[in-house]
Amino acid sequence: MFCYQCEQTAGGTGCTRFGVCGKSPEVAALQDLLVYALKGLSAVAVEARKHGITDGEVNRFTCEAAFSTLTNVNFDPERFPPMISEAVELRERLKGKVKAKAGAREYPDAALFKPEKTLEALIKQGAMHGIMSDVDADADVHSLKWLLVFGIKGVAAYADHAALLGQEDEAVYAFIHEGLAATLDPEKTVEEMIGLVLKCGEINLRAMEVLDAGNTGHYGHPVPTRVPLGQRKGKALLVSGHDLMDLEKILEQSEGKGVYVYTHGEMLPTHGYPELKKHKHFYGHYGTAWQNQRREFSQFPGAIVMTTNCIQKPQESYKDNIFTTGLVGWPGVTHIEDKDFTQAIEKALEMPGFKEDAPGKEVTVGFARNAVLDVAGTVVNAVKDKKIRHFFLVGGCDGAKPGRSYYTEFVEKAPKDTVVLTLACGKFRFFDKELGEIGGIPRLLDVGQCNDAYSAVQIAVALADAFGVGVNELPLSIILSWYEQKAVAILLTLLHLGIKDIRIGPSLPAFVTPNVLKVLAENFNIMPIATPDEDLEAILG
């Protein structure tokens, strides 16, 4: 195997024996083959669109399948052969539509291959189509192609979340196919690939906008909400991941059953949505970020449901009471296919639950764009009156790799006349810090999940308009932590918007060559984090 799509990849270069995330070589090969199949399907989809043919099933499947190859989503080898077969079946069906309308066409090898029949043979076949077998004459073109693939995986994840809520955009699907198909072209130049990478950022902005419309349309705009970090006496069910619809169904199906529902990880911001918080048994938040789940889940006295990415290898102590749903999978873990969460609710009722109340601390969530822009006038006046000197957007992914303490220290050392906006699970390095207020405005504003990056962009654009300047002229600095492919897509969106001086860490992507990094540095002044003291000094002077 060879995989370098996440920040924690072995040695900062690539996992070659076993994934740091827990991905086996067998699963890696199957995922590589699925991505190869999606490239072939995409080549046919691009040709079909030239002749006015689109296929909704192909669109949806492409996103679901790409999402399943993200870091920490699906580790179950039995789940991939059906998807590989479906990719080929959809490909051939779409070819038939094209042939009927425009005659036979020539396609690249990825659109012609036939999958093997057995799991073992598929694994061997997948080993021939991984990152290292995909050789380009130019190392920088190769780097940009995989940067594009990883960005598209992030876009596909957002598009899948949105589609589940009934929100879709043909332009998003068209680019996903265009981008994947482009990686099969051996004649692509560095300049052409940079253009596609930046277009991926543009399309990701649209995908996040569509997802935002789905979330706010179904559940209302988030409002500032205090969330307890303690426990309430009684039976307990924990929901982790990102999917709001899964949480909604769990809340509806557990209503009146005597079970309190808790969030974990990126589900924390869901407490701010009016249509979710109305459920009286939706109590509080348990635990911190995804990489701590094995310790935290072993101590949770109830059932656990993983809704999207972020699963780790379950410990035996809780393997019988953890469930997966949607695209998530782990060998030997019960998978809920039809969104009937009865099994998980019954398991929660069987388990002891919390024996006594333990209120604990509270944190505030719900500072999405509407909540922040409602007080935009106050914010603008506070800046003009020099009560607020600077804004920091400190967001992104959390992880176990050393170096992430930087983000805790940075927020703790940020001067008292600065405001910190945060989103995604990187917040768990400092989400419970008491930073105080400036003129009634909390110094720590939780914008939401990584899925809510659209809100952060809209806040920045609105503030720029209010001050009559460009986003790069705002007293705003972006400090990113990255781990997986949705973070890659968000970074590409920021670059598409022309935002400069972004600091990223704890390490730079292994799939970015020195020459590609040089281009990013020269055009956007993107840079690695240093130390909190050095970066604060450089930013604030």
Image (tube, grey):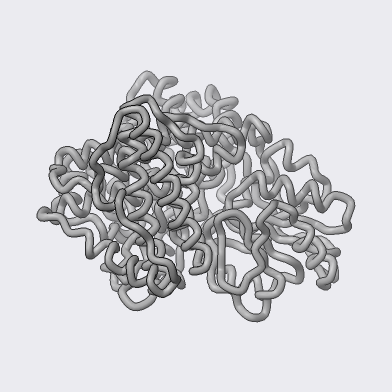
Residue 236 % position (x, y): 78, 63
Q: Residue furthest bottom?
A: 316
Residue 440 shows up from this direction: no
Total numbered badges shown on the rendered structure: 0
- Residue 144 falls left or right of residue 473: left
Is 27 located above or below residue 444 in the figure? below
Q: Residue at x 21, y 54 (%)?
A: 143
Residue 449 % position (x, y): 54, 46
Is 464 located above or below residue 105 in the figure? above
Q: Residue at x 19, y 54 (%)?
A: 142
Residue 349 % position (x, y): 84, 66
Image quarter (top left, top right, bottom left or bottom right) of the C terminus: top left
Image quarter (top left, top right, bottom left or bottom right) of the N terminus: bottom left
Residue 527 shows up from this direction: yes
Is 383 located above or below residue 20 in the figure? above
Q: Nearer the viewer, residue 68 or 315?
A: 68
- Residue 295 falls left or right of residue 526: right
Q: Residue furthest left?
A: 137
Q: Nearer the viewer, residue 334 or 280?
A: 334
- Residue 123 falls left or right of residue 424: left
Q: Residue at x 22, y 64 (%)?
A: 133
**Quadrant in which residue 100 is drawn:** top left
Q: Nearer the viewer, residue 37 or 159?
A: 37
Q: Nearer the viewer, residue 495 or 58?
A: 58
Q: Residue at x 40, y 49 (%)?
A: 153
Residue 395 % position (x, y): 45, 49
